Image (tube, rainbow, N blue to C red):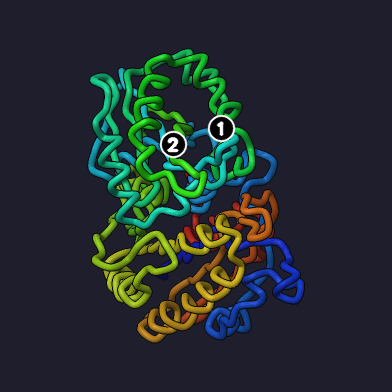
Amino acid sequence: MKSLLIIIDGLGDDQVPALGYKTPFDYAKHENIDNIAAMGIKGNVDICGNEFIPESLKCILRLLGVQAKDFPTNRAYLELLAENRDITQEQMVLRCNLVSVDETGMLTSFNGEGLTRAEQAEAAAICDESLSKIEFLHLSEYRNLLITPRNNDFIANIVIKPPHESVGENIGDLLGDLRKRSSMLVGFLEQARLKLRKFEKNGIHYELYPWGVSVKTVMDSFSQRHFGMKGAAVCSAEIVKGIAFTLKMEAPKMVSATGETDTDLKEKAAVTTQMLKTNDFVMTHFNGSDEAAHRKNHYEKAEFITRIDEEFLAAVLSNITEATKVFICGDHGTSSVTGKHLAAPVPFVAGIVGGAGVIPSIKTYSDIWSFLYERGSK
């Protein structure tokens, strides 16, 4: 029997007063999800437990059946793999956001708010005039990577809060530990800050915010973990593509799909349908819901969930011709009230489409493994 895992990133949420004290998921229209729930089961399941803070890298790896002991330390290395790049054991890689900062030094956004995509690309090009020992790699919009020589003390001891968890705090304080531990990065950041002054407007200027250092990581493949199952990932977000590459899952290129709410849902539906024909397992990931919640835009999040149901799920379900296990869930919650990730159980729906079968009770993440991968995970 085939398996389809649909991850709506950051699906869980707080109850929002403007939505009648409903979550965006409860507020959204999702007839197709409801139909699966009616013939299967639904509920909430804790993906993180008390083992790690809620974030996509570890939550998605857990949903794919990876044990916590095998998790990479951070996600930057996997995002690098998604760009068909690699590093040596003598290098390290950091995520690097383009952020906005006010005149007092307060972080006002984690995502270059106030700049168009064209301006964000221009800002990245300016910052790419890097120091000789630092390589700057632009991914998309506000997302970038920094490749530097490996610093074991930095890796072991650096403390930098994620920028999306730090809006409203002073950037000097947030990057204080980095400034103590890497004069090379300090020099690079100062050069970038001066170059980015050209984008300043209304008392807001732009800076680079490095965080999430990681190193080269080798992992067993998806097929090795699941007794020969052939897996594919339909995704656009860099981190999810990186996960697919490191687990040696098929990750087809798409033309119009993005990691945002403007993604081409019909293209994702067509590619998911095709992947189900040639793979035992397919994971399709939607990142826009998480981005909307980080922007504290509950209406955008609810509308995107509605569109996933109407434009993606309806098309996929209509093309399923053999018994297929379908599991729809969030990887973690993201509050569209605070903009931060939530350490709470996430909504899920499980069913069998195009045939019949037994659906186990889903109480923990290991029950998800039993449902999707039959014999569990190595």
Q: Between residues 119 and 325, which one lies in front from this camera angle?
A: 119
- Residue 65 visible somewhere in the drawing: no
Q: Position of residue 323 (x, y in %)?
A: 43, 78
Q: Position of residue 251 (x, y in %)?
A: 29, 56
**Does residue 303 sit above or below 86 in this rendering?**
below
Circles 2 and 1, Cβ within 8 Å, touching? The answer is yes
Q: Is residue 350 left or right of residue 319?
A: right
Q: Position of residue 357 (x, y in %)?
A: 53, 76
Circle 1: residue type: Ile
If you read the primary sequence from the N terminus, does the residue marked by circle 2 or circle 1 appear first? 1
Q: Which residue is mark 1?
A: 171
Q: Which residue is mark 2?
A: 207
CA neighbours of label 2 inside 10 A, class few (<14), some (14 to 19), many (20+): many
Q: Quadrant of residue 235?
A: bottom left
**Does residue 252 sit above or below 98 in this rendering?**
below
Q: Residue visible at 37% across and 74% down? A: 265
- Residue 127 visible somewhere in the drawing: yes
**Does residue 353 sit above or below 83 in this rendering?**
below
